[in-house]
Image: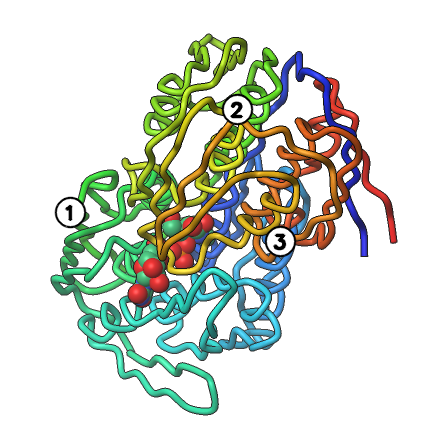
Amino acid sequence: MDKIVVEGGGRLVGSISISGAKNAALPILAASILPSGPSTFKNVPQLQDVATMAKLLRRLGGEVDGKKTMVVHPPHGRKLKLEAPYELVKTMRASVLVLGPLVARFGKARVSQPGGCAIGTRPIDQHLRGLEAMGAKIHLDHGYVDVECKRLRGATIVLDMPTVTGCENLMMAAALAKGRTVIENAAREPEVEDLALLLNKMGARVQGAGTAIITIDGVDELQPVEHTIIADRIEAGTFAVAAAVTRGDVLLEGAQAEHMDAMLAKLRGAGVTVTVERGGVRVRGGGDLRPVDITTQPHPGFPTDMQAQFMMMATQARGESMIKETIFENRFMHVPELARMGADIHTDGRVAVIRGPRKLTGAPVMATDLRASASLVIAGLVASGKTEVLRVYHLDRGYEAIEKKLRGVGAKIKRVKA
Ligand code: UD1
């Protein structure tokens, strides 16, 4: 297996081009199932998760061509197969995003039930409850969910929590349902808004995306479109933290500051200089970092996907920081690895207390999820000596060419092929 080797110590200076958002690309690629012709997507990030979604779309009988610009012919004809198999869902939970579009367009679908994952149990009960409210019959057997409904009908759905992919699945299903669907306690993430924009270009009638109530008036058919995916706010935030902890000066080219309010506020609170420029967001570290007090929340609150990176930053701040994780129950796997590099972190349930600043020393480390792995790469940038981050496949799921982008701003980092 590949590993990433980092020599710590240098400042990051220059600019990094931010890729398209993984979490926008995945639902948008799934939405390509809704019209009957091919759609074109631009600014698609080159990631393992995107490759998995492309593989799934092909498995369903679709055709996928291109990379950064992707043309997707939806499943049709004799190759049509309405099943998302276990082998794909187990490698990427977001595979479940094809459920809503398949049922809406073809009247049924069979999707492997995602099991637990490293960061928690992550059920899909809200996705299923919503589809049931829209008239679908749901049957669970042999680890699969079978969903069937000739034509979904609009319903009022109150989500128990603002689940991101759950909300997206239901929006896509409702776009072709008969009548009006209202999703209350909806997710407000920018990626949900990007999906709504795409659906409306296709001819759907979605209102309120970005707020807690989304209304969808179903239509009989949707048209293929061309769409450019928004910038990845989590990738941008990750590099922002890397710039801050190395006392660097980095322009995050193409980053959309309006999607990053909570994390930029926390960076500024930590003493980092953040300026919004025409080409993106500039982040400058310099003086001593101040401690942070963070609770992860659904958007517009502080994103759970930035928690591990900010915890790494807190190890370099003068004083005591506190980080509370409220979205996932088991998302502190980076803690023992950071501790092995010299961090002082105590956890109690969902709360972590971090005391700094601590000198970190390089070590071989590994993590069991994507963002935790990113926090270890950043730790390697400030640690003395050599850090080896193992299990690079986690990083490849969600960061496009992370080592190349960091090398471009002066980091001593390389990938060592197995
Ligand atoms: C999405 C993001 C992921 C991010 C997460 C939280 C994508 C592809 N992934 O994941 O990067 O970390 O949002 O911002 O967009 N829940 C239920 N029942 C459900 C659905 C969710 O109990 O049916 C719970 C989950 O276990 C979790 C919480 O709701 O505790 C939020 O999860 P959710 O928003 O669904 O995360 P994902 O959409 O899977």
Pointer 1 or 2: first along the chain: 1
Of 359 and 299, the residue lying toward us: 359
* The image quadrant in which ligand 1 is located: bottom left
Q: Quadrant of the N terminus?
A: bottom right
Disc 2: which residue: 240
Of 98 and 377, the residue lying toward us: 377
Q: State which mark lies toward you, 3 or 1.
A: 3
Q: Residue at x 57, y 54 (%)?
A: 369
Q: CA distance from mark 2 to mark 3?
A: 21 Å
Name the image quarter holding residue 202: top left
Of 231 and 378, the residue lying toward us: 378
Q: Is residue 221 visible?
A: no
Disc 3 crowd, CA 10 A, few/some/many (<14, 14-19, 20+): many
- Assign a secondary structure to mark 2: helix
Disc 1: which residue: 213
User: Looking at this rendering, what residue extends furthest in the bottom direction?
Assistant: 142
Q: Mark 2: which amino acid?
A: Ala
Pointer 2 or 3: first along the chain: 2
Q: CA distance from mark 1 to mark 2?
A: 32 Å
Asked whether the beta carbons under mark 3 and mark 1 sit within 8 Å of each other, the answer is no
Residue 66 image offset from top left, x and y in percent = 68, 45
Q: Residue at x 25, y 53 (%)?
A: 162
- Assign a secondary structure to mark 1: strand
Disc 2 crowd, CA 10 A, few/some/many (<14, 14-19, 20+): many
State whether residue 183 is above or below residue 403: below
- Assign a secondary structure to mark 3: loop
Disc 3: which residue: 367
Q: Mark 1: which amino acid?
A: Ile
